Amino acid sequence: MYYELVDLSFGQVGLVWGNEASPGLVRVVLPEEGISTLSLIRQAFPGAASLSHATIEAVGRNLKKYDRGLEVNFLLPELETTCAGYFSRQVWQATARIPRGKVKTYGQVAKEIAACGAARAVGAALGKNPFPLIIPCHRVIRADGELGGFSGGGIAVKKRLLEREGVLFDRRGRVAAVSVHSVFFPGGRLSGT
C-alpha cells in the first residue's frame, strides 16, 4: 500500500492506494481533531509507504479544485470498490450524483436505488464509505433535516463541508429546506424519505 498527502484548506487529506502499476484508490482519509492524517493512515495501513503516482496526483488536483469551490466530477472507476457489496456500490453511485450545495435524505437515496424503506441500510453503507469527498456522503442527511452521522471526522466536519458548499441551516442547526432536493412536509419531515 501507498499513500499521498494533499493539503486542503480544512486540513491534510490522505489518499491511500495500492498496485503501483495500475493504482486504484483504496481510501480517502480526512483530518480528525487532535490526530494527524499520517497517524490515521499508519494506524489503518501500517506498512503503507509514501509514493506519488500520476493517477493519484490527478485525484489530489481534483480535491484541490473541490476545495476552491469548483464542481468536480470524480471518476468512480479509479476507486477500488471490488470488496464492497452490490448494495453499498449502488448507494455510493447514487450519492456521487448529488451536486455540490445540495443534499438528499437517506430515504431519498434508498428510493433512488429502488430500495424504498431502506434508509437505515443506506446510512450503514455510507458509514462504510472509504472515499469521503469523492463519494460525498456528507451530502446525505436525516429526514428531519438533522445531519445524521459522518465517519469522516464527525458531525462538525460534515456541517463545515456543507456550509463551504453553500448549504443553508436553520436556527436549530438543521439543513434548510432550500438545500434539499425536495420540500418540507408540514410535520417537519422532508418528502421522499
Image: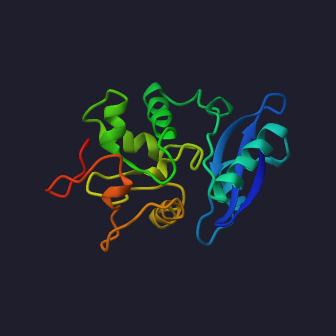
Q: Quadrant of the N terminus?
A: top right
Provide residue 120's location: percent of width, then percent of height.
31, 43
Q: Nearer the viewer, residue 18 or 175?
A: 175
Q: From this view, report whether residue 109 is shown above or below residue 9.
A: above
- Residue drawn at (31%, 29%) of the image: 115
Q: Quadrant of the C terminus?
A: top left
Provide residue 128's location: percent of width, then percent of height.
49, 43
Provide residue 130's location: percent of width, then percent of height.
57, 44
Q: Quadrant of residue 57?
A: top right
In the rendered structure, the answer to whether residue 137 lies left or right of residue 19 reads left
Q: From this view, report whether residue 184 is shown above or below residue 155.
A: above
- Residue drawn at (44%, 51%) of the image: 102
- Residue drawn at (64%, 44%) of the image: 27
Q: Quadrant of residue 11?
A: bottom right
Residue 138 appears in the rendering: yes
In the rendered structure, the answer to whether residue 142 lies left or right of residue 31 reads left
Q: From this view, report whether residue 68 is shown above or below residue 170.
A: above
Provide residue 71's location: percent of width, then percent of height.
60, 48
Q: Nearer the viewer, residue 188 or 6?
A: 188
Residue 1 appears in the rendering: no
**Colour mode of the rendering:** rainbow
In the rendered structure, the answer to whether residue 118 lies left or right of residue 43 reads left
Q: Nearer the viewer, residue 44 or 152?
A: 152
Counting every numbered tag in the picture gives 0
